[in-house]
Amino acid sequence: MRSNQPQTIYLSDYTVPAYLVDHVDLRFELFEDGARVHSTLSIRRNPESARSDASLSLDGDSLSLQGVSLDGRELQASEYELTDDQLVIADVPDAFQLNVVTWIEPQNNTRLEGLYKSSGMFCTQCEAEGFRCITFFPDRPDVMSRFRTRIEADQTAYPVLLSNGNDVDRGELEGGRHFVTWEDPFPKPCYLFALVAGDLVEKRDTFRTCSGRDIDLRMYVEPRNAAKCEHAMDSLKRSMRWDEEVYGREYDLDIFMIVAVDDFNMGAMENKGLNIFNSSCVLASQETATDAAFQRIEAIVAHEYFHNWSGNRVTCRDWFQLSLKEGFTVFRDSQFSADMGSPTVKRIEDVTLLRTAQFAEDAGPMAHPVRPASYMEISNFYTLTIYEKGAEVVRMIHNLLGSEMFRKGSDLYFERHDGQAVTTDDFVRAMEDASGRDLAQFRLWYEQAGTPVLTVSDEFDEAAGIYRLTIRQDIPDTPGQIDKKPQHIPFALGLLGSHGEPLPLRLAPDDQDAPDERVLELTDAEHTFEFHGVDERPVPSLLRHFSAPVRVQYPWTREQLLFLMSHDPDGFNRWDAGQRLTVDVIQSLVGTPKDTPVEPRLVTAYRHLISDSGLDQALVAKMLQLPSEAYLIELSESADVPAIHEARERVLKHLAIALRDELVACYRRNGESGAYEVTPEAVARRSLRNTALSWLLAINDEEARELAVRQFRGADNMTDHMGALRALVNSDYEDDRTEALATFYEQFQDDPQVVELWFSVQASSDRAGQLPQIRELMAHPAFDWKNPNKVRSVVGAFAGQNLAAFHHADGSGYEFLADQVCRLDDSNPQIAARLVTPLTRWRKFAPAYSASMRAALERIRDKKGLSRDVYEVVHKSLA
Ligand code: ARG
Ligand code: ZN
């Protein structure tokens, strides 16, 4: 337990490591009551370090030191100092071998950092600073070493022993024990170290690389999951091929392994040659995983695989550079998913996440730049800003340079920095050097936090035939940053004529063959663009495909939005126009009497979407998703959540009543057709029929109730199973809800991933997820405080998705969350710090709400022995 007040770490304090570790030799003796770790480090002074004193400091956390010797001589206690978090040896030679023996207790490790046990197996999570929970080491990514790892354990309980690289030796030991030795030829930072020991089944496949090498692909899972590996394995092979074709990146080891573990703080981890996954992000079968899960798994498998180049071969100099690997790799996995499915749908999904959650983060107390300048606890910086905004920044470079130059830039980056630990600046420089473009101002995207606001105004000069567009950019103040400089923003747009025809964008009167879409580059605080040869006032289609992560303000009329919804050639903007229209309608109804009329043109627009089967059904499926409560809250100044909830429900029910027959027809038209597939068309079909079902149940439609019960009983896949269950759970049919939940649990109780779905469908429902019911779920035998997925599926789903219940006027939701954060803080601070997020947004809510949210935060702040993780989030939120 850390007692001192947490320290802030600054990027500006960075210095190169004083000592380098060329080689690491590890020997793990694994037992039920603990593990002994023998480490032999080949250390030498770093010639690039300016430090003159000869003391060596190694990081260590929760370690029991059993012995340390230098060049074979055991050191006396007087020759080193052991502090809370370091082992300091006063005087060391320029080059030497250090032997350190530590004792750790993986079976009691509930933080899930370092070496721990998950359903009987040993596994590790070292990023960012978990390796120091295993042995003393300079735990920073710019120290790169070759690792050799010998694992010893009981042969019966742990037949499978894995680490990074290639297995070079194995054998039997006394007492029913055995060992395997692994050697990783690639130097790597210790955060990429991994170890797994367990009784696992192995699934094998192979992949032939572009240069003709055969790679051994292996998945290791618990025996009960043997039938859930195929999708991840196929996704892996597709990722390997794609990275060769699109980025020219070939895999470098002879073996690539994936392991699934149930207890995991995050989604997955890209350890060299040995990726470790949260079970929920890798295991799938038609009967147990939804379409969303299939797509998530494909994306995460790709993400971790892509890290082999963007992260492992070229890694981060320090943790301020985290987006160097995460932003770039998210961009890569997003391109991959777009290529595997529907690019427009993928773009809509990415932007929805960005606008709902990253914009909220960027406007809140934890706002930070893509390359932060300081942090207290690095685990708190695995954020939407680092990942998603970071990916948008890379996407903008891609848009500015074009695919070909971007590829030249990434080739140069990988070639120039292979085997190095580098910075986001090195990445941008490679892009500049390869393309000849100047990205000096563009770098502000890495340095300035906050979401730029673009205010667009226009005027039409009929006599001159000129349409003028003025765009002003403002970047809001964020904690510690005011008066920001204008950023370099690529702004894609088109103009539409009155029949929906794209107009040529003539920036000069004599501009022949002008294109009908342009990417304008904004660099000043304000620009005015003139479009010539325009005969009538056009409708602008702004920020096409969301060409920059900004907010756009323009006084759209509902007429214009309806027009764009059906005419914009950019599918993304068609969707966006629909969202803006629906948001506008809902916002205008918040707090009004129940009988206030709902915009009739909204009904007409949705009728058209539901009935016209000639439209791209994947896009239609997305357009039928009403803007979420979370997004509506993000857009409001002083949110009254119950009122927003009520207005949104009112619109949904109004649409459902008006379009009742069309919805039933849509449901029937999109019935099952043939074998289960996860193609954009099939996913859209299931999405449409389940949306129709949920809308119809929201208005207590008897026929829909029968359809739902029938679908629930007959579903051959989890998307439809869950779609019917969700519709029933969110309906007024209480008996059906109770019965369906019981049947579902009965059927899937042995499958943790499905039980998590069962928890979250209740916790996120305003019918089944009121506070007393949440407490019941937490008392359920399947609930487990030590399993982050269970905590997320109940407590996280309640506070993050069941917004009307969480923001109950009596403040009970906030009190409840504060209790759970305090409870979890002792066992798993990383998860506790994530869970607290909804409370940190207290300034966004109407006064009565924000006061009690603040009080809940203060109660957490005053807890004794608060972890550094929660300390940072709570103190910054209250500042
Ligand atoms: N690098 C992992 C990824 O693929 C995430 C690891 C995060 N770990 C943590 N302790 N925050 O995105
Ligand atoms: Zn990553």
Image: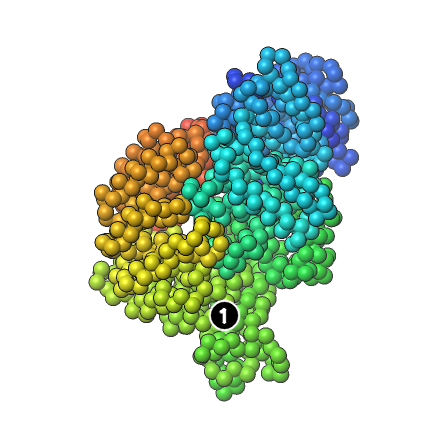
Q: Is residue 514 above or below residue 395?
A: below
Q: Residue at x 23, y 44 (%)?
A: 734
Q: Secondary structure at mark 1?
A: loop
Tell me residue 595's x, y (percent). 21, 62
Front in this rendered view, residue 851 or 781: 781
Relative horizontal placement of residue 356, taking residue 121 as reference (left or right)? left
Q: Quadrant of residue 10?
A: top right
Residue 75, image x, y percentages: 69, 15
Quadrant of the rendered image containing residue 596 = bottom left
Q: Is residue 93 above or below residue 841?
A: above
Tell whether circle 1 marks a residue whose Cβ is less than 8 angstroms from ligand 2. Answer: no
Q: Which residue is mark 1?
A: 569
Name which residue lies at 67% across and 33% down.
165
Q: Is residue 864 something that shows in the picture?
A: yes
Left or right, 117 with respect to 670, comes to right
- Dividing the image into four equal quarters, which quarter contains ligand 1? top right
One can see residue 802 in this view: no
Q: Residue at x 36, y 66 (%)?
A: 611
How many discs mark residues in the rendered view? 1
Residue at the limit of the structure toward the top, as seen here = 175
Q: Position of residue 72 (x, y in %)?
A: 74, 16
Say what amino acid the circle numbered 1 marks: Pro
Q: Tell which of 440 and 578 is nearer to you.
A: 578
